């Protein structure tokens, strides 16, 4: 997890709930915040999940990214925090912060190396610096955005094939009002 702010614990909990994650490393610009969050989740996650899970603060962002199977970012960064040179085959990069054209969580090399998916094409291709900037400078073309959530959910486009351990996948979310409405309806229904 890159970022130790308000979204970080929720992203960690969701990923750990749907994947057999055994270890979480949290990196933050303010190490004390990463340490605090690691302590909090280190106590609560094993109880909530009913399985052991190690949660620790990471001092070395590069090393943490290189070792992770899933890299999730939730920051307001204007400069890349995930570099393509650090990535290895099979990783998934989850970018949910940096929601404006002048913000970045990944560099051009990371985007170029990855199979790119977005929450909405309209939002990501106009608002998300992680997509807008590589499109503008020619690192990727619009056809390099493989699918959005609607296409994936409808089965119109495929995500990572089962058993694919070589592709690097990158998901960029800028948020959409429709997603917020669906989540609210689900919560009210429960």
Image (spheres, rainbow, N blue to C red):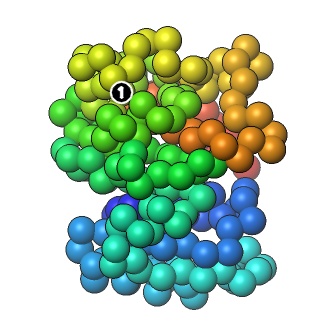
Q: Position of residue 84 (x, y in %)?
A: 39, 45
Q: Nearer the viewer, residue 189 or 71?
A: 71
Numbered label tally: 1
Q: Which residue is mark 1?
A: 131
In the picture provided, is 151 more to the left or to the right than 73? right
* Residue located at (33% from left, 23% from top): 139
Label 1, residues with CA under 10 Å away: few <14, some 14-19, many ≥20? many
Using the rendered image of the protein, determine whether residue 139 is visible from the camera's viewpoint.
yes
Relative to residue 75, is residue 104 depicted above or below?
above
Q: In this view, which residue lies farthest toward the right?
A: 162
Q: Quadrant location of the N terminus? A: bottom left
In the picture provided, is 111 more to the left or to the right than 126? right
Relative to residue 134, is residue 65 depicted above or below?
below
Q: Position of residue 88 (x, y in %)?
A: 53, 52
Q: Nearer the viewer, residue 177 or 132?
A: 132
Q: Nearer the viewer, residue 142 or 75?
A: 142
Quarter-of-image position of residue 15 = bottom right
In the picture provided, is 135 more to the left or to the right than 13? left
* Residue located at (72% from left, 24% from top): 158
Quarter-of-image position of residue 150 = top right
In the picture provided, is 107 more to the left or to the right than 171? left
* Residue located at (76% from left, 80% from top): 51
Q: Position of residue 22 (x, y in %)?
A: 68, 75
* Residue located at (41% from left, 80% from top): 57
Using the rendered image of the protein, determine whether residue 34 is visible from the camera's viewpoint.
no
Which structural element holds mark 1? helix
Q: Nearer the viewer, residue 103 or 92?
A: 92
Q: Position of residue 75 (x, y in %)?
A: 31, 53
């Amino acid at each position: 997890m890159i970022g130790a702010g308000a979204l970080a614990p929720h992203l960690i909990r969701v990923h750990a709930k749907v994947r057999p994650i055994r270890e979480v490393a949290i990196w933050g610009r303010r190490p004390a915040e990463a340490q605090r969050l690691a302590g909090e989740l280190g106590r609560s996650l094993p109880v909530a999940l009913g399985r052991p899970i190690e949660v620790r603060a990471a001092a070395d962002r590069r090393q943490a990214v290189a070792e992770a199977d899933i890299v999730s970012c939730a920051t307001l960064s204007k400069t890349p925090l995930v570099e393509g040179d650090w990535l290895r085959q099979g990783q998934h990069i989850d970018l949910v912060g940096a929601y404006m054209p002048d913000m970045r969580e990944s560099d051009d090399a990371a985007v170029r190396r990855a199979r790119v998916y977005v929450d909405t094409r309209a939002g990501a291709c106009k608002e998300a610096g992680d997509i807008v900037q590589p499109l503008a400078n020619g690192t990727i073309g619009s056809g390099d955005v493989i699918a959005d959530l609607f296409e994936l959910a409808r089965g119109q486009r495929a995500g990572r094939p089962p058993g694919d351990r070589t592709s690097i996948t990158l998901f960029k979310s800028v948020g959409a009002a429709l997603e917020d409405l669906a989540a609210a309806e689900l919560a009210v229904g429960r």
